[in-house]
Image: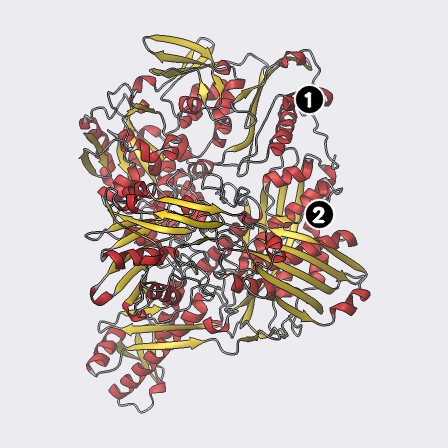
Amino acid sequence: MLKFIVNDKILETNAHPGTILIDYLRDELKLYGTKEGCKEGECGACTVLAGTLDDKGNISYKSVASCILPIGDVNGSHIVSIEGVNQEELNTIQKAIFDYSASQCGFCTPGIVLSLTYFALSSSEFSYKDAEDALDGNLCRCTGYVAIRNAAKALSDLLKTKSRDMNKRIDVLLEAGVLPSYFAQIPQKLKKLNASSASSPSAKARIIAGGTDLFVQIPDQLVESDLKFISERKDLNYIRVDGNCIRIGAATSLEDFRNSCAVNKYFPFMKDDVLLHSSMILRNKATLAGNIVNASPIGDITIMLLALNASIVIDGNGKTREIALDKFYKDYKKFDLSEGEIIKEILVPFMNEGVLYNFEKVSNRKILDIAAVNSSILIETNGMDIAALRISAGGVASIPLMIGGLDNFRGKEISYETVNKLAEYVVSQVAPIDDVRGSANYKKLLIRQLIFAHFNKLFGVKVCAGEGC
Amino acid sequence: MRNVDMKMHIRGRSVFVDDIPAQEGLLHAVLFLSPIAKGTIEKLDISKANKAEGVAGVFVGKDIPGPNQIGHMIPDQPLFAEKEIQYAGQPIAMVVAESKHLAKKALKLIELQVKEEEGVFEPREAFKSGMIHAAPRVITAGDLDSAWSKCEYIVEGKAHNGPQEHFYFETQRALAVPGEDDTMKVYASVQSPGAFQHHIAEILNIPMHKVELEIRRLGGAFGGKESTAIWAVAPALAAKLLNRPVKMVLGRNEDIATSGKRHPYEFDYKMGLDKDGKILAYQVDLYQQAGAFADISLAVLGRSFLHVSSSYFIPNLKAMAVSCKTNLPSNNAFRGFGVPQGVFVIETAIEHASEVMGVDPSVIKRKNLLQDGDFLPYGMQLEKTNAIRCWEELDRRSGGIARRIKTIEAYNKANTETKKGISVVPVCFGISFAQTALNQGSALANIYADGSVSVSTGAVEMGQGVNMKIALIAAKALSIGKDKVRVETTNTSRIPNASPTSASTGADLNGMAAKMACDTLYKRLQVFAAKKFNHNNPDEISIRDEIVYLKSAKTDYKWEQLIHEAYWDRTDLGCRAFYATPGVYIDRKTERGRPFAYYSYGTSITEVTLDCIRGTYDIDSVDVVHDVGVSLSHNIDKGQIEGAIIQAIGWSTMEQIKYNSKGKMLTAVNSYKIPDIKFCPKEFNVYILENSLNPYAVSNSKAVGEPPFIHGLGAYFALVRALRSFRKDKPLPASLPITPEKAFMYLYE
């Protein structure tokens, strides 16, 4: 039996926990405002909010793609669809969209309203940039975004006149006409909900972390399978500083990681780099651990963590073990994890003083796209010489690749010549294939350029190639 | 004024086809598709699928009561392939079941044996082997042969443009509900009420009057729901055969893999100019990638063909255009309808010429812009030409075209790791269906006894705001508040034989018909009011803002009372009107005529920055001056201009489709990328040309749906400039789109 609140109603259902949320909303609850545009989390038309309570009883909402979200994963949560933000008149967000004519055919519009509601709920400063980030997974084929941007700017300006106190955010938004009044009672109702686990007790149950890829790949199968939800493991939802490393629990979402104070203190580049991974409605569900076990040769997070020399702690079958991430991958989608084991946490060591890091990603579209090639570098220098070097590269092998044999470059002076040699060496280590992300030849030439890009960005090394230089 | 539905859209209350609550007994249909692009069916066994859980029926070609035929322009396309397979994804059978899930499961039980043959996927190759949908069209103007010798510069080359997926948010879908007496009501997401009603009636083998097609609104269409009738016809067929309501809703990837696209073309061009850059001669051949069936491709081809000279006066010209048959899904209409391709190739030729001449392309463009008195290739002489006005207005508004080009040149001299590019693109877009017969629209205006008004037309609302434009036109004609006017669904029982809502003519044709119907009602009210006031001249009665005036004197007689009494006096308060655009024709033998009632003009300037390390780029700014005549609604027109331009920038840059060597689609929703909010140019300024009067359309307005699409080519040509400033040792790029991969390979391969 699953229990949750949908808009202002408490609901119980015996539906299979793998039932997709949008199907449940539309087919069972007859809430037709949520639109299905792609069923892969690629367009944002189905965006809804999912609210959960933290230990202190504070509620926090996330925008999520309801088309790839199983209802078992929102068990005990508050689901908000477009019907749940409607008021007598247009609410403040809806009015901004109306005032700027930011809707044409209307099919993407409910999703846009919900993503902007998430912005209002989550942005500490109500900055326009946060609004744009909140909308990075909401495509629109009609307006060309100019009107949507104008509406978001107006909304940001309006909200900036209100209190930015995160502790009073719900009250502020009730007052500002963003949320309907029933939101005030939701935390109390959630507390009393007492939902039991949605996970199957079966040892063979399929483990769902964020599910943002699995529910794209095999939704029909999962709808009928036993599932175990990592999101229920509150004990694994943490980011902790421990000595000279940071520990990230397996249930931590990419957005929580990106916004974590500890992460921003020790790895300040993550705030922007992680934005290149998928979109807000996916990052709010997708986890770092899920990205690792997905084992995509092009996984952005994996490529970042490889260069940062992360390791993972694996739990299961009565023991706990730790393994360096760069030893984890064996072959295409094959890795060192046995049945009964799960990734418990990820350890990322702090970077020593003076060590530099850079992430590069080239994809057909900059946002919400899979890279043709991505790469991270971690480099320690001694004067202008390379003292230590780690380079990872995605999209160029059957696994997320850690480039080996870089010791030869220790002691080399950072110069065009050295970078050129390094780039040639990296190219000799890769074997990309032709696919929809690009030709093998492209990827080979591109990884060479990205090595240059690393040194260009970190050390200003000139990239001199082609006629134009 | 905004889209009439906007408040409902924003609250999620607009009802699209899939939002209609399920009727008792509703079934779901899915199509069984060909896995190969070319071959013959040797064996098809549906018996296991037929017996599967929840299956109500499995149907193939021989189950169709009427002819197995849905060809849009020529009868060449079966609904279900029976023997010959012409493209991967072609429907062969249909499974109908209690749920979509069960229907999809049963699909896997259908057994198909095929004999695969080698397909043809390239238009030039198809042309060589005689695989064409119709004889090539040829148009000539002036004396091309003798013009070449007068040219100082001659350039020739090949060019190519890629396809574009519509990516309307609401995929193809329809719900068919059988009624009494063999009738069928179909709720569909389609743009062509008359044509689709016809296709359904033919397949079901019932007269058209038994088919009622009801269209409330579409979640986007852009031309993709104009001609290919498969997804409206198939559920109607199932509903007929099972006598139960049946719904068909395509999944996104099925929609991408099996629906038509904007046509790719291959081009050969040759252009000659005098020493000052005046274009004297232009020859161009267009090979259209049409796909397996003619669908609407011949009409698209015609428009490309009639727009090969774009915004330029070219005294000596020859164009050949041919629609090539290949083993891919039939391509179809997409915003611009062939014009963007015709413009693309001449802009490429000018780009080429500018490099040979050593001048900026804008210099040649400005010198050859159309003006009053110029002739277009089909012999039409221009008047009220706004090409130069738009250019000069843009020059004023955008900080000076020449100055901005200089700034870019200086930037590129100073920078090696990034390069900028800039491009000016003028637009001259003919308005009217090139197929003259389609230039007709009708409207039914009803005034109810309480004073509220409903207007039905053949126009389909798909987000472009046509219903608001019609409401405004009707409200103005009756001089009442627009809230008194409700624009009804598009329904074939109210409006017969409606043309597709396309060619940007939705408001022109249907708005004019609505105005005519309301004008007639107004006259009847004048007559009634004159009688009531015992006044002998009805012309001296007027209605202004819902109040009756007698000889310009305000009375206390209000709209509601007027209508109430007019009804009791037995005044006819319903009126149907019909409009056919006057004076348009084309003689297909001589390719001479006046195919378009008027032209929409515009000019834009687009600036880009290319990252020469990574091959990625940003579209920095777009400034555009566009001519919409007297705008019916600034908000709606601006939205159309912005949306069209971003859509075209997508086509010019990131939107790409890949097939394997056997013609099977590799691209799916996770690899077909359309512009997102962060890709949208940071600077985007739209100026609507002022003081433009257009006597050829309703209330002096001009059509706006498609013409601004052309501006988006500016992103492509600005990228060409940026690429060229990095390296010139290669041939000029002549293949659209320029994806990051293509940009990179140009820089580094």
Distance of label 1 from label 2 (alpha carbons): 31 Å
Residue A419: give its label: 1
Image-based side of A377 in relation to A293, left or right: right
Chain that bears disc 1: A
Q: Nearer the viewer, mark 1 or mark 2?
A: 2
Task: Answer left or right for A329 relative to B420.
Answer: left
Q: Quadrant of residue B561?
A: bottom left
Q: Secondary structure at mark 2?
A: loop
Callout 1–callout 2 Cβ contact below 8 Å? no
Amino acid type at image mark 2? Leu
The reply, left or right, for residue B168 in relation to residue B682 is left
Q: Which residue is mark 2?
A: B732
Front-most of residues A138 and B243: B243
Q: Which quarter of the image is occupied by the C terminus of chain B?
A: top right
Note whether A259 is above or below B561 in the view shown. Answer: above
- Where is B589 relative to B187, above or below? below
Q: Secondary structure at mark 1?
A: helix
Residue drawn at x 41%, y 70% is B511
Work out whether residue A123 can be spotted: no
In the rendering, at what x and y percent does residue B29 appear? 31, 50
Here the colouring is secondary structure
Residue furthest front in the image = B42
| Amino acid residing under circle 1 | Val
Residue B8: x percent and y percent?
Answer: 31, 53
Q: How many residues crowd mark 1 within 10 Å: few (<14), some (14–19), many (20+)? A: many
Q: Is the residue marked by circle 2 packed among few (<14), some (14-19), or many (20+) residues within 10 Å? A: some
Pinpoint residue B656: horizontal percent, then vertical percent. 54, 45
Q: Residue at x 48, y 27 (%)?
A: A299
Indicate the quadrant where residue B182 lies: bottom left
Residue A262 in sight: yes
